[in-house]
């Protein structure tokens, strides 16, 4: 028998719907404690493709809600608790052109307290008994982000991030510049995606092989950083191919050499902001690489790495702050 969750109003269902992943948590509004979570690789891109292939073309928003309801039911069954009427907040790519429903972007300057977020409230229905709040993204006129702005709001609720640049490494790394409690500008870098394309699909694929980070690999990575600062990116890339053909270095060393070139090219953009405090939101294998990068550029003393617990909860922290502004 399924019971009703005690103190229903104390919780919300937070959804981070990315391009290639889906995360849903049952989160306490005040403490941020996660009572349960659900993860899948059913990202927005895959959802849109499935919806677009349907012959009857179910309403797109409804199609996304059906999957969302399955995830909620999974958590409900796991806890043996009814989650009916608990509000759902969605951030990330669900408000994009391939998401549940496209929303206009908020614009900079953008308050890191959350009051400038653009969102749409979709009232509960018989088929989906949850009020749903769909959060949009942010633009500076040249670049766009969806989801990271909520993470920045979450970060600002945990630590002081004023007058700094926040770096969010990944497939598309983000450099977000904050001044006077607001995001004033940001840049996106295709660092991770270019690295993957080069190592898997280019002429370099036979010259690189992954391996656990060792002291020798750190030297290769630092070499890649140095090369990125002193020579043309397109030229130094071919040096990896030449290394293998001429029998210089190993494939696993080339892997970290290539990584250093990509990350170094990204970080070179910050040379003009060398005196600015840098806050880095890096986890897993990326963290030691960005630590090496900051050291190679001589910026270790002006850099703060956010702890893992905070990083794991940035989205929900941002959504909690959003709830407070409603």
Image (tube, helix red, strand yellow):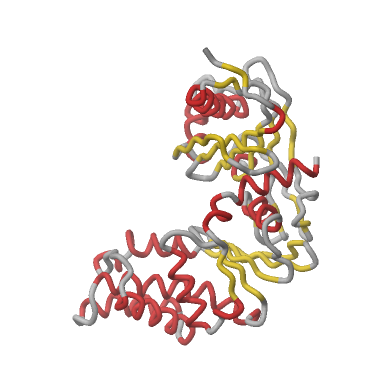
- The spot of residue 223 in percent (x, y) is 38, 82
Q: Is residue 45 above or below residue 295?
A: above
Please name the residue shown 67% across and 27% down the image. Answer: 86
Is 248 displayed left or right of 313 in the figure? left
Is 263 displayed left or right of 125 in the figure? left
Quarter of the image with the C terminus in it? top right
Is 120 displayed left or right of 201 in the figure? right
Please name the residue shown 44% across and 84% down the image. Answer: 226
Residue furthest to the top: 1
Number of numbered tags placed on the structure image: 0
Q: Is residue 37 above or below residue 262?
A: above
- The spot of residue 288 in percent (x, y) is 44, 69
Which quadrant would residue 216 be assigned to in this image? bottom left
Q: Nearer the viewer, residue 43 or 236?
A: 43
Which quadrant would residue 176 be assigned to in this image? bottom right
Which quadrant would residue 135 be assigned to in this image? top right
Residue furthest to the left: 247
Is 306 displayed left or right of 228 in the figure? right
Residue furthest to the bottom: 230
- The spot of residue 55 in percent (x, y) is 49, 22
- The spot of residue 161 in percent (x, y) is 70, 65
Q: Is residue 73 above or below residue 300?
A: above
Q: Nearer the viewer, residue 307 or 18?
A: 307
Please name the residue shown 63% across and 50% down the image. Answer: 146
Please name the residue shown 74% across and 32% down the image. Answer: 121
């Amino acid at each position: 028998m399924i019971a009703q969750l005690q103190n229903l109003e104390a919780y919300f269902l937070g959804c981070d719907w990315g391009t290639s992943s889906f995360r849903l948590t049952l989160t306490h509004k005040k403490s941020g404690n996660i009572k349960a979570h659900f993860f899948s690789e059913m990202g927005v891109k895959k959802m849109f493709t499935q919806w677009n292939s349907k012959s009857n073309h179910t309403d797109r928003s409804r199609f996304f809600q059906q999957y969302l309801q399955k995830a909620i039911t999974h958590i409900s069954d796991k806890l043996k608790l009814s989650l009916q009427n608990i509000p759902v907040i969605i951030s990330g790519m669900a408000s994009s052109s391939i998401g549940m429903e496209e929303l206009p972007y908020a614009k900079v300057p953008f308050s890191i307290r959350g009051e400038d977020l653009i969102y749409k409230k979709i009232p509960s229905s018989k088929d989906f008994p949850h009020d749903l709040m769909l959060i949009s993204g942010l633009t500076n006129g040249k670049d766009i982000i969806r989801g990271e702005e909520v993470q920045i709001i979450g970060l600002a609720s945990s630590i002081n991030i004023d007058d700094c640049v926040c770096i969010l490494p990944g497939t598309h790394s983000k450099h977000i510049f904050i001044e006077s409690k607001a995001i004033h500008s940001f840049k996106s870098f295709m660092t991770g995606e270019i690295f993957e394309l080069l190592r898997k699909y280019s002429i370099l694929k036979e010259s690189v092989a992954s391996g656990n980070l060792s002291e020798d690999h750190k030297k290769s990575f630092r070499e890649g950083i140095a090369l990125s600062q002193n020579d043309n990116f397109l030229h130094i890339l071919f040096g990896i191919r030449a290394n293998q053909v001429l029998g210089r270095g190993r494939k696993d060393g080339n892997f970290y050499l290539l990584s250093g070139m990509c990350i170094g090219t990204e970080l070179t953009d910050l040379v003009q902001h060398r005196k600015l405090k840098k806050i880095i939101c890096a986890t897993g294998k990326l963290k030691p690489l960005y630590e090496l990068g900051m050291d190679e550029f001589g910026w270790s003393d002006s850099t703060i790495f956010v702890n893992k617990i905070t990083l794991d909860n940035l989205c929900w922290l941002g959504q909690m702050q959003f709830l407070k502004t409603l």
